[in-house]
Image (cartoon, rainbow, N blue to C red):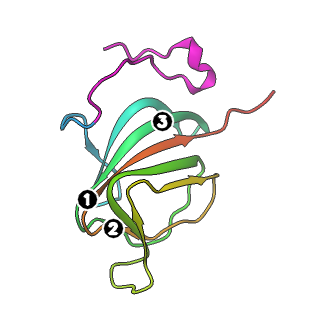
Amino acid sequence: MNLVPHPGFGLFAKAHREFFDALSQDGWTPVAGYHGVDEKILSGTLDIRGGQGSVTRLARWAPGARVAHPVSHLWCEEVFIVSGSLAIGLPEDNEARHLAAGTFACRPANIIHGPFFSREGCVLLEFLYFPPTCN
């Protein structure tokens, strides 16, 4: 598999990849600091120190996984719930907002969001990116 960035993606520096089984069991790695959440990078890289890049990834939440505190980050984020469900709030919170498969969010950088949990588990398709700057 050739993962050399293709010039057609410009500043996002993604490799050209044709159809492959993104949901296969190989290639998943734990997300640092998030117990029960794994990721599979489908394309791209995100250079957090350099403030550039773009990643398309799957995030797989195990049943009962949670992020118990609100989060914020320096990059933009788009999230689509592919399967299962995710909730905003804490499991013990009667006011938690439950989000079904098919739900989408689009956030600019530095937006506080969460906490989150998933009772049944879920798979998310995420697009993470630093917007290319105009010169």
Q: What residue does disc 2 label? A: 66
Mark pair 2, 1: CA separation: 8 Å
Contact (Cβ within 8 Å) of mark 1 with mark 3: no
- Residue 23 among those drawn in magenta: no
- The region drawn magenta spans 1-22
Q: Amino acid at mark 1?
A: Gly
Residue picked out by circle 3: 55
Residue 7 placement (x, y as % from top left): 57, 12
Farthest residue, direction left: 25
Circle 3 packing at 10 Å, graded few (<14), some (14-19), many (20+), is many
For image coordinates 21% across by 35% down, the residue present is 24
Residue depicted at 40% across the width and 69% down the height: 87
Q: Position of residue 120 (x, y in %)?
A: 24, 65
Residue type at the position of mark 3: Val
Left or right of 67, for residue 14: right
Q: Is disc 1 surrounded by few (<14), some (14 to 19) or many (20+) residues within 10 Å?
A: some
Farthest-out residue, right: 135
At label 2, the amino acid type is: Arg
Q: Earlier in the sequence, mark 1 or mark 3?
A: 1
Residues at circles 2 and 1 in contact by the CB criterion of under 8 Å:
yes
